Every structure is written in structure tokens, then in C-alpha cells.
Amino acid sequence: TFAEVMEQLAHRGPDGHSVYVTDQIILGHWHFWTTPEEVGEQQPLGLNGNPLKIVFDGRLDNRAEIALNLNLNAHDSRQTSDAALVLLAYDKWGEECFKRFSGEFALAIFNEDNRELTCVRDQLGCRTLFFARHNDQWIVASEPWAVTAAWKTRPTLNEIALAHYFSVKVPEDGQTFFTDVYELLSAHIVKFKLEQKRISKYWEPDPDGKIR
């Protein structure tokens, strides 16, 4: 059940949790307020008059740049959390916004209008996301055992992944220790809509780029 999924992630949220429920989706978030802007914030987060809801794990290191490009003044910028900045950026630029972000993040944005869930992982994979399809439902969580907690049956171990682990081999892209549970790769987006799933890469490193 969803309650068991949330229980598996309780260690991530010393500041409590919130849940958003509709007939289409359930979103849950454990709060860990680490910046002044997010203290007291209740995720899943939405904006007034906007069909988007977000759950966000991580931080933005280029807040000032994003806020400037969103035409926020200094006061509004100080009052806006990283999650809210991401939601404003997604509303303005769509999927193109993710390549603008610098920092560690894993997030999910649900569009109530078209019933589409968009999940994203940062460019270097500092924060994690795992997903599976089970009993005609998509399940997404920050840890693989939280995904399997939604199953009524015991998950099956992925023997190939275990063999790679014990032989110190590089694992196959996206594989986990559980069969049918997959890790979203860094710099990738996965979109869920009904029974469909679409994965794409939103960022590539620039080999010619220079840092002074």
C-alpha cells in the first residue's frame, strides 16, 4: 500500500510529511527543511490556478540565476523555495528548464490537466529515483525497497545484478537488485501517462566547455 511505501522513506523526513490524493495519483513527501526558504513548506506543492503539483528532493545551487530569468524581484526570490522555483521554471520553459538547473535534485511533477507524471534526475545523479509497474500502476520512489513496499508479494531478486555486484562488475544501466524495478539514469526524464512510459535524456556534457 502507499502507506507502506511512505513508511520505508520515513528516515528522510524529520519535519513530517504530507500526501496529495486524487482519483488519478497519490503523491507523498517527507519534509526535511534545510534552507530558510523552505521552512514550513508543505509538499506536494502547487501554485494558485496552476494544474501542476511537485515533489522535490534536493537543492538548486543557481537560485539567483533562475530567479533572475523568471523576472522575480529580490524580495520574491528570498521568499520562494527551490521547489517553487522549479515549478515556476517548468511552467515557463517546459522540459527545457531542467538543463538550466545546477545542483542536486530528483523530482516529480504531475499535470492534473493531461494526467501526465514527469520525473527527473539531476545531471550527475546525486539524487536517486526508482520506478516499476505493478498491477496496472506506476510506482516511483527515492529508494528501490520503497517501490517494492507497494507490492503484496515478495519482490524477486535480480540475480544478474547480484552477480555483477559480487564480481565487482559495472551494472547494466538502470538495473537494481530487484527484478522489474529500474533506476532512472542521471540527466534523464521519464514521463508516465496511463500505461505508457517514455524516457529521454535532457543533458549532455560539453567536451569543449571551459571553466575559468
Image (tube, rainbow, N blue to C red):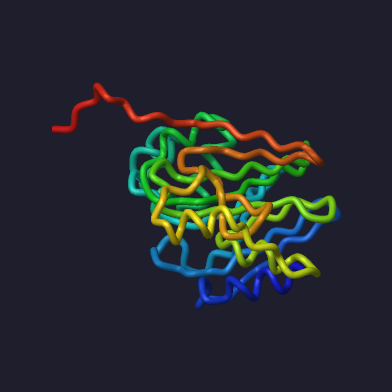
Q: Nearer the viewer, residue 57 or 180?
A: 180
Q: Quadrant of the N terminus?
A: bottom right
Q: Nearer the viewer, residue 104 or 187?
A: 187
Q: Considering only vertical position in the picture, is 212 above or below 5?
A: above
Q: Quadrant of residue 10?
A: bottom right
In the visual, does 196 lie left or right of 187?
A: right
Q: Quadrant of the C terminus?
A: top left
Residue at the location (54% across, 69% down)?
31
Q: Nearer the viewer, residue 64 or 202?
A: 202
In the visual, does 103 lie left or right of 19?
A: left
Q: Nearer the viewer, residue 109 or 71?
A: 109
Q: Quadrant of residue 161?
A: bottom right
In the visual, does 114 lie left or right of 170?
A: right
Residue at the location (44% across, 61% down)?
166
**Residue 56 percent across, percent down from the top left:** 54, 55
**Residue 115 percent across, percent down from the top left:** 78, 41
Residue at the location (51% across, 44% down)?
172
**Residue that sits furthest to the top in the current view:** 208
**Residue 61 percent across, percent down from the top left:** 34, 48
